[in-house]
Amino acid sequence: MTIRRPTIFELVAQLVIVALVVLLAIDVLDAYRGYACSEPGSRSDCYPWGSEGPVAGLWRYESKAAYIGSGLASMAVLTLSGLAPLKVRRAWVGLSFMAVGFLAGVYIASFA
């Protein structure tokens, strides 16, 4: 199977997906180096891991590992959806795959 050249709509969607993946990567790296707000001496740039604050009870914030894992899963889904137009024959199929992948990636990133 050959690689098809994406349409202008697919390229715009791919640029949006790339921007989201970059932002998620920055957030995951920041979280990896971050610490919980519950730790003594925490500053205002801490992460609310555990059951505290407005995110109490959300599975994504239960632990640092869950937060980073969900961020990496979102990045993987978004990356695969951005590559979809390169492997399908028709533009509407590529855009459909990208839309479903985008929604899945965003849903994973903000799942509550």
Image (cartoon, helix red, strand yellow):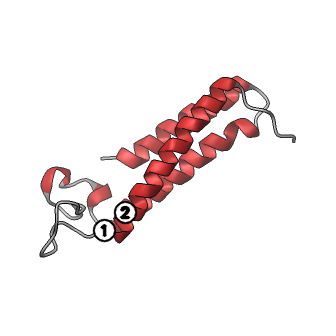
The answer to whether 27 appears left or right of 46 in the picture is right
- Residue closest to the eye, 74 or 40: 40
Crowdedness near tag 1: few (<14), some (14–19) or many (≥20) residues, C-alpha within 10 Å:
some
Tell me the quarter of the picture where residue 10 sits. top right
Say if 103 sits above or below 29 in the image. above
Residue 70 appears in the picture as rendered = no
Residue 29 appears in the picture as rendered = yes
Are the two marked residues, 2 and 1, in contact with CB atoms closer than 8 angstroms?
yes
Say if 69 sits above or below 82 in the image. below
Dot 2 falls on a residue whose secondary structure is: helix
Residue designated by label 2: 30
Pick out the residue farthest to the right: 1
What residue lies at 60% left-to-right and 30% top-to-bottom?
Answer: 12
What residue lies at 48% left-to-right and 36% top-to-bottom?
Answer: 103
Say if 107 sits above or below 40 in the image. above
Tell me the quarter of the picture where residue 47 sits. bottom left
In x, y percent, where is residue 61?
Answer: 28, 59
- Tag shown at residue 52: none
- Tag shown at residue 34: 1
What residue lies at 32% left-to-right and 56% top-to-bottom?
Answer: 60
Dot 1 falls on a residue whose secondary structure is: loop
Pick out the residue farthest to the bottom: 40
Image quadrant occupied by the N terminus:
top right
Q: Disc 1 marks which amino acid?
A: Gly
Q: Disc 2 marks which amino acid?
A: Asp
Crowdedness near tag 2: few (<14), some (14–19) or many (≥20) residues, C-alpha within 10 Å:
some
The answer to whether 30 appears left or right of 40 in the picture is right
